[in-house]
């Protein structure tokens, strides 16, 4: 596996080694010891799987104080996946990075604790699976406004399909102080 640091400290792009032939392919999506050597968490406690239609935007979600790191990959279709730094005092606070993840490039994005995460589906449908470093705690979940001008994410759509929770996301300037351990 190849691990690349993105422009945001701790947000990592993971490219697995894929072995393919005329029968199909094989790849290792997670290996505890290799992950640890590469700077990824070696322990995950929850796996999630979602399926969404084209134009659906999920996020920008975060959980505090029980922060979650997420290792995100697409098993069918394509998404534009985004991480936003919301760590108090971080030199890159409010900055974002976005990558296209799909079933062809098989890349994964690691979004560490202290970041808001979201994605928009760019194919007809997409199935997204991700590993989490902490259990989901709905009472601790927050949603950052997907189109906050102060962040300036260049989404590949102007009219996404949103949940009521994501439509009501808070602006970066209105986020409460969120400590990250």
Image (cartoon, rainbow, N blue to C red):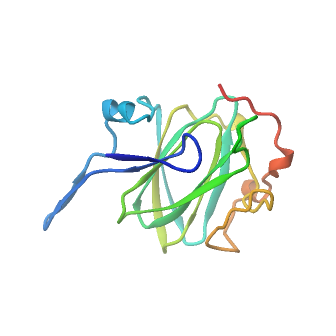
Q: Nearer the viewer, residue 96 or 144?
A: 96
Q: Quadrant of the C terminus?
A: top right
Residue 131 at what x, y percent from top left? Answer: 46, 41
**Residue drawn at (75%, 34%), measured in percent from left and top?**
89
| Quarter of image, res 118 | bottom right
From the viewer's side, name the closer residue of 172 and 63: 172
Furthest residue toward top = 181
Q: Nearer the viewer, residue 18 or 23?
A: 18
Does residue 38 lie above or below 1 as drawn? Answer: above
Residue at 61% from the left image edge and 66% from the top image edge: 56
Q: Is residue 147 left or right of residue 29?
A: right
Q: Position of residue 51 (x, y in %)?
A: 49, 60
Q: Residue at x 59, y 46 (%)?
A: 8
Q: Position of residue 5 (x, y in %)?
A: 49, 46
User: Total label count?
Assistant: 0
Residue 94's spot in the image, x, y percent? 73, 49
Residue 132 is left or right of residue 156, and the answer is left
Q: Is residue 26 above or below residue 31?
A: below
Would you identify the image quadrant in which residue 154 lies? bottom right
């Amino acid at each position: 596996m190849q691990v690349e640091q993105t422009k945001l400290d701790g947000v990592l792009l993971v490219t697995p080694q894929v072995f393919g032939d005329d029968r199909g392919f094989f790849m290792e999506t997670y290996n505890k010891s290799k992950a640890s050597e590469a700077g990824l968490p070696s322990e995950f406690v929850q796996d999630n799987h979602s399926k969404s239609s084209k134009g659906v935007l999920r996020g920008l979600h975060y959980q505090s104080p029980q922060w979650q790191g997420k290792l995100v990959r697409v098993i069918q279709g394509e998404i534009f996946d985004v991480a936003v730094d919301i760590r108090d005092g971080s030199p890159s606070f409010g900055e974002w990075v976005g990558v296209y993840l799909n079933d062809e490039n098989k890349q994964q994005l690691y979004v560490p604790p202290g970041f808001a995460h979201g994605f928009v589906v760019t194919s007809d449908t997409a199935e997204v699976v991700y590993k989490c470093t902490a259990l989901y705690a709905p009472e601790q979940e927050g949603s950052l406004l997907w189109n906050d001008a102060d962040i300036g994410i260049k989404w590949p759509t102007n009219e996404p399909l949103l949940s009521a929770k994501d439509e009501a996301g808070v602006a970066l300037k209105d986020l409460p102080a969120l400590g990250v351990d």
